[in-house]
Image (spheres, coloured by chain):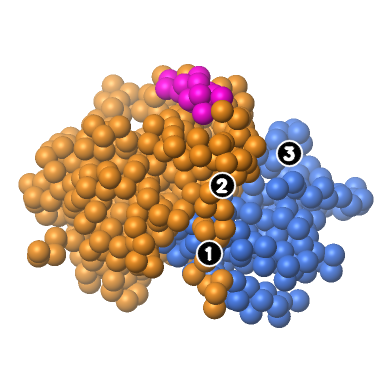
Chain colours: A orange, B blue
């Protein structure tokens, strides 16, 4: 098999590509220069992104060009407008945006400039999760370099295009990766998601039109502009074009973030990129796109990694972050960890989520500890059904309910066995570590 | 695990809790936003970095004064975010990731070893004041698991034997 074409991580492999000098030598800012030189209209740019079929890479897979087109017409609505860049990467298993910000921050800045050009947003805030110290520093330095080179601020490239970029550091709350929670946090408040509607494009930051885009989504845009929507569609599938960054973590030989065309099978990624399951063991279960997407059995490893294939299979592409569990791992323990996470991260506004996540945590915890009751399995399903879908302000409750339903559906025997045995049949096995022996 | 309860020490109410340098920095920061209070969270980060690693009641009150907010509002924001500390802590902070990707590769053993080497409990500080230990829910280092952050710097692909080597010599 020939290696599929790559573009997202091309510059990242070059030494010092985080500096302006090296990044420009390797094509950074070519897209925005083309748009300014050829005098594209904002509408033309939105059309190009729509034609490319680019879908958001933050988890929901919403078409990026369509999202941009929701911003009100500038002639009819003169309000100031904002772009918020979601760099609050916090979905368990996900570490792709971090690589882009650390290794190729100018690529992201160019994506921001193009989005700002298309939507007429004169100010962009990059909301970086607080723990990401190096990505924050690299991106912050890159913004300073770009400002000094006349690519950020007023009169960009000698035209009347203006875009200011400000860095903004979060402080450790998962919920601030939800777009309305992010906006509340950016305004200096607790990160409580807002009910929708109104949608951000109508009433966003400080009541003004706002679009929130993920880092990797924006990162794709300069390539689309430079090489064309048609080129973009030569990769991936018809409904999910382009390449995507897939993180593979857990029980594998070579963990890493890999660039693959959308639609490649999870099996091929696991075997040809991530070196297969570690220690010569077999696969037991896997998450296709972060902890919110639900565990799948090994028998489903042939699934193509794209939005529609996974949706049809009753799962989700999410952030395309594959977490692999080998045959010795305990799915109940994994669920206990995940339920604890959602319990910890629920903002507490909606009772279904605040109470539901705590109950899920307690129930998975007692099943794993050997104190599970026969009725607990039905209780898990009934609780998850009471939490989602559409019963709360944001999707955090869904993110806890989806993996709960999935584990009951695909791994009921594991749950039953824990209850019957009064304990975890594989206790101890997953505590084996890479280094414990050495 | 249960969090350890910490004590808030007595405060000197006549002293300005913010330095002139911090105030100057905030003056620049508020210019990035159409509303002043949007700079609150970045400002709280800077306070914590410069003023002893935690946010004392005096600092929160001084920030409230600076941003034109009620102290209780500032407290409400600071208490929402896991990265802000409302009590004094050990000098070196170790944040051990214990989410699923790290758990699958030995995070519990790393955490147990960190507690052993530092003498601190999860959510608390060591008696000698050198260390504060906490668990963190996924720090985006999943493909380099297990890991912890020491004073914000990531240490990845850890083995149990690495813990003492990294932490042992710190004062």
Question: Which chain does tag 3 point to?
Answer: B
Question: Mark 1: which secondary structure?
Answer: loop
A275 magenta-colored: no
Marks 1 & 2, CB-CB < 8 Å contact: no
User: CA–CA distance between discs 1 and 3?
Assistant: 42 Å
Can the viewer see residue A283 in this picture?
Answer: yes
Residue B88 position by quadrant: bottom right
Upstream in sequence: badge 1 or badge 2 = 2
Can the viewer see residue A340 in this picture?
Answer: no
Q: Which residue is mark 1?
A: A432
Marks 1 & 3, CB-CB < 8 Å contact: no
Q: Which mark is nearer the camera, 1 or 3?
A: 1
Marks 3 & 2, CB-CB < 8 Å contact: no
Asked if badge 1 and badge 2 are on a common chain, one would say yes
Badge 1, how many Cα within 10 Å: few under 14, some, many 20+? some
Label of residue A424 in the image:
2
> Where does the image place residue A7, in percent across and percent down from the top left?
20, 60
Q: Is residue B76 above or below residue A277?
A: above
Badge 2, how many Cα within 10 Å: few under 14, some, many 20+? many
Asked if badge 1 and badge 3 are on a common chain, one would say no
Q: Is residue A285 above or below residue B148?
A: above
- Pick the front one: A263 or B34: A263
Q: Which residues are magenta?
A: A375-390
User: CA–CA distance between discs 1 and 2?
Assistant: 15 Å
Q: As drawn, is A331 to the left or to the right of A148?
A: right
> Where does the image place residue A289, in percent across and percent down from the top left?
35, 45
Question: Mark 2: which secondary structure?
Answer: loop
């Amino acid at each position: 098999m020939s290696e599929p074409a790559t573009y997202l991580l091309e510059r990242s492999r070059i030494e010092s590509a985080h500096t302006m000098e090296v990044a420009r030598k390797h094509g950074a800012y070519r897209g925005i220069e083309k748009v300014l030189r050829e005098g594209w209209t904002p509408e033309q740019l939105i059309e190009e992104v729509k034609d490319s079929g680019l879908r958001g890479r933050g988890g929901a897979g919403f078409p990026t060009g369509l999202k941009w087109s929701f911003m009100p017409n500038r002639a009819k609505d003169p309000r100031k407008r904002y772009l918020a860049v979601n760099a609050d990467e916090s979905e368990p298993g996900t570490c792709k945006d971090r690589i882009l910000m650390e290794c190729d921050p100018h690529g992201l800045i160019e994506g921001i400039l193009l989005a700002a050009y298309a939507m007429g947003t004169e100010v962009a805030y990059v909301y970086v999760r607080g723990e990401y110290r190096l990505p924050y520093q690299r991106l912050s330095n890159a913004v300073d370099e770009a400002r000094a080179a006349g690519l950020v601020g007023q009169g960009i490239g000698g035209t009347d295009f203006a875009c200011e970029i400000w860095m903004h550091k979060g402080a450790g709350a998962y919920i601030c990766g939800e777009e309305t929670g992010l906006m509340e946090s950016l305004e200096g408040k607790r990160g409580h998601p807002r009910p929708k509607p109104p949608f951000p494009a109508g009433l966003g930051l400080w009541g003004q039109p706002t679009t929130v885009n993920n880092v990797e989504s924006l990162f794709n845009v300069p390539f689309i502009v430079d090489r064309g929507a048609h080129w973009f569609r030569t990769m991936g599938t018809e409904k999910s074009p382009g390449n995507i960054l897939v993180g593979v973590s857990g029980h594998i030989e070579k963990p890493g973030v890999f660039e693959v065309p959308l639609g490649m099978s999870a099996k091929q990624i696991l075997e040809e990129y991530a070196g297969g399951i570690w220690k010569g063991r077999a696969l037991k279960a896997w998450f296709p796109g972060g902890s919110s997407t639900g565990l799948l059995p090994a028998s489903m490893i042939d699934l193509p990694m794209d939005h529609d294939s996974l949706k049809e299979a009753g799962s989700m592409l999410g952030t395309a972050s594959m977490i692999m569990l080998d045959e010795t791992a305990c799915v109940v323990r994994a669920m206990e960890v995940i339920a604890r996470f959602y319990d910890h991260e629920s903002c507490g506004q909606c009772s279904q989520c605040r109470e539901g996540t705590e109950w899920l945590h307690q129930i998975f915890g007692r099943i794993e500890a050997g104190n599970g009751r026969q009725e607990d399995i039905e209780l898990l399903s009934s609780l998850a059904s009471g939490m989602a879908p559409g019963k709360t302000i944001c999707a955090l409750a869904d993110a806890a309910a989806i993996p709960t339903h999935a584990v009951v559906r695909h791994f009921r025997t594991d749950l039953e066995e824990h209850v019957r045995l009064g304990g975890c049949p594989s206790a101890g096995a997953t505590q084996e570590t890479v280094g414990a022996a050495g | 695990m249960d969090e350890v309860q910490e004590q808030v020490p007595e405060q000197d109410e006549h002293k300005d809790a913010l330095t002139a340098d911090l105030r100057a920095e905030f003056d620049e920061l508020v210019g990035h936003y159409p509303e002043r209070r949007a700079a609150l969270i970045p400002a709280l980060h800077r306070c914590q970095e410069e003023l002893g690693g935690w946010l004392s009641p005096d600092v929160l009150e001084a920030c409230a004064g600076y941003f034109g907010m009620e102290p209780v509002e500032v407290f409400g924001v600071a208490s929402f975010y896991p990265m802000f500390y409302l009590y004094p802590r050990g000098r070196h902070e170790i944040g051990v990731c214990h989410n699923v990707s790290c758990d699958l590769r030995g995070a519990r053993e790393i955490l147990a070893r960190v507690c052993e080497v530092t003498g601190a409990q999860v959510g608390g500080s060591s008696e000698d004041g050198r260390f504060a230990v906490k668990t963190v829910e996924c720090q985006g280092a999943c493909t380099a698991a297990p890991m912890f952050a020491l004073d914000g710097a990531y240490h990845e692909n850890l083995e149990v034997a690495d813990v003492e080597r990294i932490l042992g010599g710190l004062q």
